[in-house]
Image: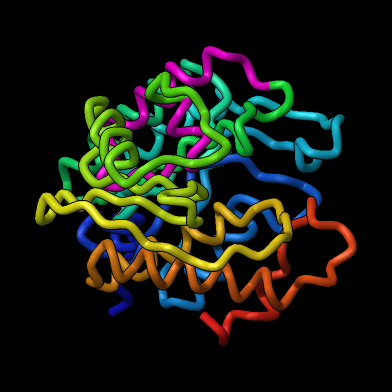
Amino acid sequence: MNRRIVISDYICGVKDNQNILLVGDVVGMGTIGSTAMSPILAYMGFSTYNLPTSLISNNFGYGQYAMLDTTSYLRQTFPIWEKLGFGFGAIATGFIPSAEQAELISKFCAVQAASGARVFVDPIMGDLGEMYNGLPPTIVEYMRVMLGVADVCYPNYTEACLLTGTPYKEEGVSRHEACLMLDAIRVFGAKSVLITSMKVDDKPAVAGYNAADGGYFIIHYEELPLFFSGTGDLFSSILIGHILRGEGLEPSTRKAVDGVYNLIRLNKDAEDPYKGIPVEKYLTIL
C-alpha cells in the first residue's frame, strides 16, 4: 500500500542542529553575505536556508547601489512558517535595514530559541570608524534590539563603538578597555560576545567574553595590509560551523581568524576587493 505523503514529514525540526537559517541581505554582485556563508557551512556539513532582508545590487563601497527592502515579504513569511511548523537548529542574522524588520526578526528568533535554536547576530553597520554609506543613524537602535536575542554576537570594533556609544580610537585600546566594551554590549542582552577587527595593546585582535564559563580572552593575529568585502561573513560562517560542531567559543574564534587570514592571503592579487573572495575555490583549506 502506498504511503500518503504529508508536508509535516518534510518540515525541518528545531532539534536538527544541521539546519541553519541565514537572515540578511542578498547582494547581486560579489561573494558577500549569504552567498559567502552558504558554501562554507555546506562544506562543514550543514544545510542552509535563506531569508533575505533586502536585495542589493552591489557592495556599498562602489558609492552607488540599488536596494529593495523586503519587509512586506518578511511580514508574510513568518506567519506561514509558523503555520507550517518550520524550525531551525541555528539562526544567523546579518544586515537588517529597518526597525520593523528588527522587531519581526527578533521575535521570530526568540520563539525559535525557546525551542532550542541558537542565535548568532552580526550587527552589520560600519567599519574603519565610520558607518556604511547610506545607512541611517537609527540603525544603531534596532541592532541593539537584535543583541537581546543573541547567544553569540560579533560586532567589529567600529560597530561595538556605535552600539556602546564609545569613542573610536584609531590607536586601539587596552585589554581592560576591551573587557569594558564587551560588558557594555552584554548589557543589551547578548550572552557571549566577540569584538573583531580591533587593536588591543597595540596588536590586531579579537576580544571575547564566553558566557559558558564567564571568562574573557584576547586572540592576537597577524594583519595583512589588504581589504576585502565580505570577510565578516567568512568569519561568521567559520565561527558558527565550529561552534555547532560542539567546539568552544575561543577555539572556534581562533579557527575563524586563521581561516579568514588564509583566504585573504590566497587572494592578495585580486583586482576588485569589493566583490569579496570566491570561497568555493578554497573550501579545503578550512
Q: In the image, what residue occupies the spot 28% across and 79% down?
A: 1
Q: In the image, what residue occupies the spot 57% across and 37% down?
A: 170
In this picture, residue 270 sits left or right of residue 281: right
Is residue 6 shown above or below 222? above
Residue 131 placement (x, y as % from top left): 63, 27
Q: Is 140 included in the stretch rendered in magenta?
A: yes
Residue 211 placement (x, y as % from top left): 16, 49
Q: In the image, what residue occupies the spot 72% across and 45% down?
A: 27
Is residue 148 shown above or below 280? above
**What segment is highlighted magenta in the picture?**
135-161
Q: Is 109 included in the stretch rendered in magenta?
A: no
How many numbered marks are there? 0
Q: In the image, what residue occupies the spot 50% across and 78% down?
A: 43
Is residue 278 shown above or below 204? below
Residue 56 placement (x, y as % from top left): 73, 37
Residue 37 placement (x, y as % from top left): 55, 60
Camera sees residue 248: yes
Quadrant for residue 66, please give it. Answer: top right
